[in-house]
Image: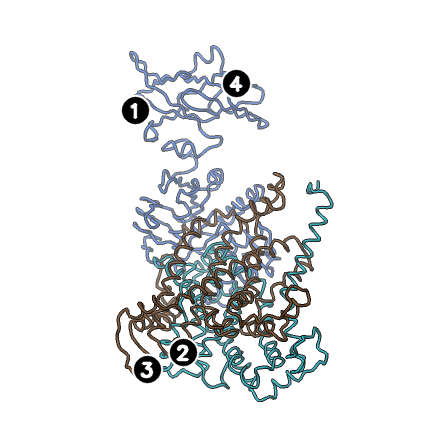
Chain colours: A blue, B cyan, C brown
Amino acid sequence: MAKISLRNVEKRYDATLVLRDCSLDIADREFMVLVGPSGSGKTTLLRIIAGLERVSGGEVFFDDARVNDVDVGDRDIAMVFQNYGLYPHMSVYDNMAFGLRRRKLAAADIDTRVRRTARMLDIEPLLARRPRQLSGGQRQRVALGRAIVRDPAVFLLDEPLSNLDAHLRVQMRAEILKVHRAVTATAVYVTHDQVEALTMGDRIVVMNGGRIHQVGTPGELYDRPVDRFVASFIGTPQMGFVDCRVERSGDRVTLATQSARIEVRDPHRRSLLGDPGVTIGIRPECLTLASGSDAQSAEVAVRGNVQVVEMLGAEHYVHVATDGGALTARVPRHQSVKVDETVTFAAAARDVHLFDRETGRALR
Amino acid sequence: MGTGLPRRSVHVGRVVQGVAIALALFWSLAPLYWMLATSFKTELEAASLAPTLWPHEVTVANYVGLWSGSLPFLDFFANTLFTCLATAIVAVVIATPAAYALSRARFRLRGTIGYAMLLFRMLPLVVLLAPLYLLLLHARLLDTHAGLVVGFVTFGLPFAVWMLKGFIDAVPIEIEEAARVDGYTRWEIVRKVVVPLILPGLLTTATFVFMEAWNNLIYPLTFVTTLEKQTLPAALVLTFTGQFKTDWGGMMAAATLTTLPLMIAFFAVQRSMVRGLTTGAVAGA
Amino acid sequence: MTQAPGAQATRSVARGTDDVPWLDTMVLPAASVLAIVVGYPVVYTLLLSTQDYNLLGTTPQRFVGDDNYRKLLLDPTFWLSLRNTAIYTFGSVAIAALLGLALALLTENIGGRHGRAARALLLTPWAVPFVVVAFLFRYMYLQNGGAINALLLAIGIIDAPISWLNVSSLALPAVMVTNVWTMTPFFFLLLAAALAGIPNEVIESARVDRARGASLIVHIKLPFLRNALLVSSLLMIIANFNDFAKIWAMTQGGPGYSTTTLVVYVYRLAFENFSIGYASAIGVVWLLLLLAFAVAYLRALRMT
């Protein structure tokens, strides 16, 4: 059990700045997910928490104690590596016992712990085997077991599922969460898969380009993304963005492109709008196919040309191009749409996100 | 589907290939057969003006002569074996941590030291011989096996570091990081995790150093003055004078015995040696 | 435990470990051994090269500045030995590399027991100690009673026995043949391994493009071998420069100076004439030449 704090953490390799000004608080026993595209710095951040890398600036605290200079072996953490990092020349049993032996625990004690963990993960029959005799999923469990058996304060997992096939991945996700509930430790989990992040995390850290964009619960990230990057990264299919001009005539304020017309009635929102324009974002499930009068009376109406229609069984994903950007809509099966058709979508005003055109920050 | 070539061309190609390989095999093995055959010939037959393909009179006198003759061949053999083994062990023990450091650490001089290792092999060792001689003289290591081992080790060390580094590079770093997380220190990691994993590479490097030391003529020639302490290469050169100058049969017997340990060592590690040289060579120095 | 090679590369480049104390103790033994036993002699050699130092001489050791270097420039034997070294080294390496390449290509598609046996047998010359090779070939090169003359006479290529090692114009080539015999397996080994490492997909897509035979070799396979060829050549060139055993045991640098390479010349100067100062000067020049060569070579290597 430990809470972790990062204050203004910075990391550079030679001249390149890999992490900039990262501050983060992870609560005791929380399952925190670091998510972001490749190169976003999430793994580096994890390794800094582990102590495998030293910070170039800033501080790291475990339970209010500064651990910048504490060596990785003394931090009471356990780590599951992306490629598992199992010791090839040792049996599964020895792999799990290796760390415990270093701490000079009694052999009997070690034995109990290893077997108990092995039972929890269903790998007891594999204890005598070598890693090369195991399947990917089994190795993954051994890597997990090796971490669990140490009974650490913090679990660190570096994309542990990315080498498994899709089916196994879903299965292991649930296993990992189950294990986390059973042990009482804080967990920090790195992934590039936003679906994994949403389904597993208590809270999520979205990172890009070495910076933390947003920290929040899955719901917060989904409903109130703090900028365009988070909005586009979280959610499948991706949120659509359209660049609009701000038109004011009389006391009406409209966002417009050639293909869209959005009336802004809410006074707070009106106050946020500045010239020359703004980018709006709409999630696919908020767009409904409209025609004729529905289109006229809708608060938000966007017309576009259909580029691709993806058939997914119960629904279609329809990708349209407008003059201000591309949108995707989820359309029920029975409504047929053809490529190259011009269609109009309607949405509610409250489902429209506003983003500053230059900085990408959300306007709330 | 086929290769598209008319059948006869393929056939001819195969024949040519077969002939070429046969020639290559002859080229490689004939001299060795010759060495072996001559060692079983009498002195007279070995020096005959019309060389015979197969010994007309097969004799083991040459080998017996090495055992019980006037020259201390067994001493030479033992000296060589001892010094080369010692060299291999010492070199590998010193080179392994250095190779590990070069492989894992990021420090500014890393690239330089790597190239420096390669550079050492370019040194005109024959010239360094004089100062080295004086150094050993002052340390009272001249005409001793210890001094010879010192010389051999310095000769083989850079290459050992380079080769071991290649093997260590192939160990995934995550395994070491897992050991660090488990609380092990660097030295412990080298001993308990890295070394077991590069064992074949260690043996290969040791064999390589062993072979190089076995081949070294110039150091024993210069540093060892007592004949009884001499190693095989130098002994062969030094004793092949006077009455032995035409004893080709005896020389070939000595040659065969000198070759045997090296052959055995070489073939024992041949496959691993390729891997070690390839990872270094193909992946770049 | 497979992963995209690119991913592994960037990870291990980006990752380093920046705790350093253990580093010193690990490199220390190796570095200090080399510093003492190599560093000190190097420095001392530089010093010696500026002195007139003859261990046998009646004149005492004295500083003469760059006299030795001037002497060197005017010394015909030095230039001859340099020329011989160049021919011996580059000639042998080039031929051995080509032969090794040919062997690698020849045995590439022979699999199974026969292939393994053939390849193992073709490697044997490399496992023979250099001194043994030298004496063996010396025996075979004998004018009267030598196997080579006997063979050539029998085939009809020559009609009188030739004294290979005693004729100035023939001695160097003869010694080079011996050198090639020893070196070819090394190239064969490495190039065969590199060939085996060419991804199957590349070969298959080349065959789909109807590349065959010579074209397949030159355009598709050779580029993959380039790195291995260059590095192994560099290793062998360096080794050959220091190659004392073979030449000494075969000819001692004779007849005359026709097989005297730099190594042999320096050895004789230092240990037969005992002119250590002059020998050191030659050594320094040798080192500079090799350095220049290596730098140029490595630069070419870096560009692949």
Q: Residue at x 53, y 24 (%)?
A: A308
**Mark 1 crowdedness (10 Å alpha carbons): few <14, some 14-19, many ≥20:** few
Q: Quadrant of residue A298?
A: top left
Q: Quadrant of residue A247?
A: top left
Circle 1 sits on which residue?
A272
Residue B2 coordinates in the image, percent (x, y)? 70, 42
Q: Tell me the SS state at disc 2.
A: helix
State if disc 1 and disc 4 touch (CB < 8 Å). Answer: no
Q: Disc 4 residue type?
A: Asp
Q: Disc 1 residue type?
A: Leu
Disc 4 to disc 1, how far (Cα)? 36 Å
Residue B129 coordinates in the image, percent (x, y)? 39, 75
**Mark 2 crowdedness (10 Å alpha carbons): few <14, some 14-19, many ≥20:** some
Query: Which mark is on residue C271?
Result: 2
Task: Give the mark nearest the N terminus, 4 or 1.
Answer: 1
Q: Are marks 4 and 3 on the same chain?
A: no
Circle 3 sits on which residue?
C57
Q: Tell me the SS state at disc 1.
A: helix
Disc 1 to disc 2, how far (Cα)? 92 Å
Q: Are marks 1 and 3 on the same chain?
A: no
